[in-house]
Image (cartoon, rainbow, N blue to C red):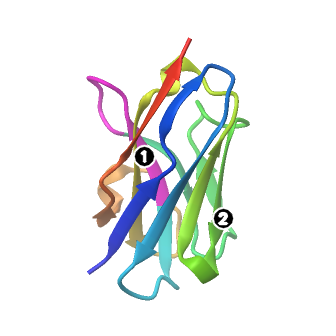
């Protein structure tokens, strides 16, 4: 069983920054990709960013490129999402996800494990 626990969400003004963390536990993650998705109010869950287990590959949604950075700490089995220049449209519940694969999936159905989510609210 895989457990993913997100933290770091909160309320921030537009232009500000937040760093989300996702701590993974339950098994070895040597072959797992870890991703971040978000679900704005009243909308579908959408891809934000993902990274391969050893950080060799990463992918981002166009809407966050240049503002968000995904990174990982293998020793801590933790993945981070650094979010800069936040906009009100970034307001959403952010979810961490994991899947055992060497690629970096960008679609929701590819992921097998999900965290409970953390709320990010950006005020204008």
Please give the name of the residue rendered at 37% of the width and 66% of the height, measured from the top-left corner: 4
Q: Is residue 105 visible?
A: no
Please give the name of the residue rendered at 56% of the width and 39% of the height, measured from the top-left corner: 61
Depth order, front residue of 51/101: 51
Image x and y of residue 37, in percent: 42, 46
Q: Which residue is mark 2?
A: 57
Quarter-wise, where is residue 93 in the image?
A: top left
Q: Which residue is mark 1?
A: 37
Sequence-first tag of 1 and 2 = 1
Q: Which residues are magenta?
A: 35-45
Q: Bin the neighbour count of mark 1 within 10 Å (Cα to Cα): few under 14, some 14-19, many 20 and up.
A: many
Q: Is residue 20 above or below residue 5?
A: above
Q: In which quadrant will I find the C terminus?
A: top right
Image x and y of residue 71, in percent: 66, 61
Q: Is residue 113 above or below residue 122?
A: below
In the picture, measured across the screen, residue 60 lies left or right of residue 28, that is: right
Image x and y of residue 17, in percent: 66, 35
Q: Is residue 46 visible?
A: yes
In the picture, measured across the screen, residue 116 lies left or right of residue 12, that is: left
In the picture, measured across the screen, residue 101 lies left or right of residue 43, that is: right
Was residue 40 drawn as part of the magenta stretch in this picture?
A: yes
Image x and y of residue 41, in percent: 31, 24
Was residue 118 drawn as part of the magenta stretch in this picture?
A: no
Query: Label 1 vs label 2: CA separation?
Result: 17 Å
Circle 1 sits in a helix, a strand or a loop, which is it? Answer: strand
Tag nearer the camera, 1 or 2: 1
Furthest-front residue in this view: 11
Q: Is residue 86 above or below residue 28?
A: above
Please give the name of the residue rendered at 47% of the width and 76% of the height, measured from the top-left corner: 32
């Amino acid at each position: 069983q895989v457990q993913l626990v997100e933290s770091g969400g909160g309320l921030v003004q537009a232009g500000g920054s937040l760093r989300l963390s996702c701590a993974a536990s339950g098994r070895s993650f040597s072959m797992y990709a870890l991703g971040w998705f978000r679900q704005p109010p009243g909308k579908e869950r959408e891809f934000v960013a993902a990274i391969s287990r050893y950080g060799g590959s990463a992918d981002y949604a166009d809407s966050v490129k240049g503002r968000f950075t995904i990174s990982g700490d293998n020793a801590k089995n933790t993945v981070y999402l650094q979010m800069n220049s936040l906009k009100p449209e970034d307001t959403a519940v952010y979810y961490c996800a994991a899947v055992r694969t060497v690629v970096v999936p960008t679609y929701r159905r590819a992921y097998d494990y999900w965290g409970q989510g953390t709320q990010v609210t950006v005020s204008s």
